[in-house]
Amino acid sequence: MGNFRRVPVGIVGASGYGGVQLVRLLMDHPEVEVVYLGGESSAGKPFGELYPHLAHAVNLPVEEVDPEIIGDRTEVVFLSLPNGLACEMAPKLLEKGCLVLDLSADYRFTDLTTYTNWYNKQRTDSATAATAVYGLPELYRSRIAEAQLIGCPGCYPTASLLALSPLLKQGLIIPETAIVDAKSGTSGGGRQGKINLLLAEADNSLGAYGVTRHRHTPEIEQICSDLAGHEVMIQFTPHLIPMVRGILATVYATLRDPGLVRDDLITIFRAFYRNSPWVRICESGEYPQTKWACGSNMCYIGLEVDPRTGRVIVMSAIDNLIKGQAGQAIQCMNIMMGWDETLGLPKLGFYP
Ligand SMILES: NC(=O)C1=CN([C@@H]2O[C@H](COP(=O)(O)OP(=O)(O)OC[C@H]3O[C@@H](n4cnc5c(N)ncnc54)[C@H](OP(=O)(O)O)[C@@H]3O)[C@@H](O)[C@H]2O)C=CC1
Ligand SMILES: CC(=O)N[C@@H](CCC(=O)OP(=O)(O)O)C(=O)O
């Protein structure tokens, strides 16, 4: 007793959806102390004014963002900002010795030309970007443990890749036949108002968007190519669904061996994720629902084989704001710090 010291952490973009999840979860994390919250339009306000239900637990102001000051006060920094801002701040924070977890797309790509083509931003930090590790612990746990900079995955890629990885890694499917059909709640679009996310627009409606050109396509393809050992193209179609939280990704692909049955694949998926506490494989024929995952860091996976078409169908459900964003970043921090991967993360969803 007496020597225990909590690690000082900062959250930049604390007023946004990802930021408030980080605040909520990190306030209860046994090893860290939240010492800095940053924002832009909210700077200067007490955090409890933005989120009154948290005022009794969070007695911090939102401050202006100055990497020099953040670097002096913290050891771990979460950047939960719109795309294109983290790459301006991370090099300075890393220089100051911080561990940096970026929730945007800035450090997800090994090839910055791909980033520039899809995100329309030129980069001057290629040396820094080359040190970043893709923060999907179920695939890159040992590399995350050694990293100083993490590019946390997007929400759709998290759900999609957890469904596809065992199939690609074991060579069970013809990669080019893979189709990802995914649905997201409106919180996936963030808190900074967009007309299509208003209740009056999104309610009673279900539609696809970004068909053939959503920016998560190259991210999913990058990791699929890594797993398959060659360049892979994936068909990805996202949909906006009238609910607030959650993503369901349904993946279809042709099996190389049409003799495989569902139980074979369940055994393979269970073995693949045997050391992954945040993935649960449904065993007795249930198909996962987003409400099972909402509020937790869990990804639920169910699967089926269609003997008529020779296709496997994998369903993957997550909470986009937790396993798809803030929870995954905390899971990565736990690994980087050598702590138990489950520390401070919710195992059980809100519902019912
Ligand atoms: N929502 C989701 O499901 C997921 C989102 N992501 C990614 O995570 C990141 C954050 O997303 P999300 O939480 O939804 O976003 P929000 O729109 O909800 O929040 C954005 C935050 O960024 C802050 N901000 C914006 N511009 C600046 C600036 N120039 N300087 C400092 N702070 C700034 C805002 O501060 P203020 O309010 O003070 O202006 C706000 O706190 C994004 O890159 C997103 O793509 C990743 C996975 C899932
Ligand atoms: C419903 C909705 O709008 N979803 C967002 C998901 C974006 C996201 O969170 O991903 P990044 O981290 O890569 O920005 C979208 O499709 O753009």
Image (cartoon, rainbow, N blue to C red):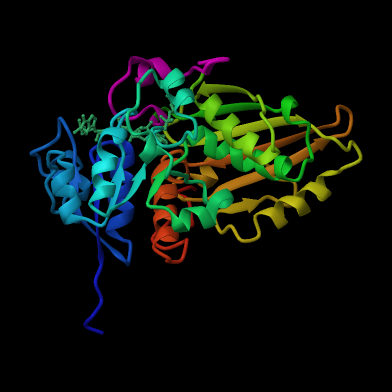
Q: Which residue occupies the foreground of this view, 227 or 52?
A: 227
In magenta, the rendered stretch is 187-213
Q: How many marks?
A: 0
Rendered residue at 82%/34% (across/down): 255
Q: Which residue occupies the foreground of this view, 254 or 191?
A: 254
Residue 329 visible in the shown view? yes
Q: Which residue occupies the foreground of this view, 304 or 214?
A: 214
Furthest residue toward right: 259
Q: Quadrant of ligand 1?
A: top left
Rendered residue at 78%/31% (across/down): 174
The quarter of the displayed image where residue 14 is located? top left
x and y, in percent, of residue 219 in the image: 53, 31
x and y, in percent, of residue 139 in the image: 58, 49
Q: Is residue 275 above or below residue 191?
A: below
In which quadrant will I find the N terminus? bottom left
Q: Is residue 65 above or below residue 308?
A: below
Furthest residue toward left: 44
Q: Find out whether residue 202 is within the magenta segment.
A: yes
Rendered residue at 42%/63% (across/down): 343
Q: Is residue 269 left or right of residue 311?
A: left
Q: Is residue 41 above or below residue 7?
A: above
Furthest residue toward bottom: 1
x and y, in percent, of residue 191 in the image: 30, 29
x and y, in percent, of residue 274 in the image: 66, 60
Residue 56 visible in the shown view? no
Q: Find out whether residue 288 is within the magenta segment.
A: no
Q: Is residue 145 above or below residue 125?
A: below
Q: Is residue 106 left or right of residue 72?
A: right
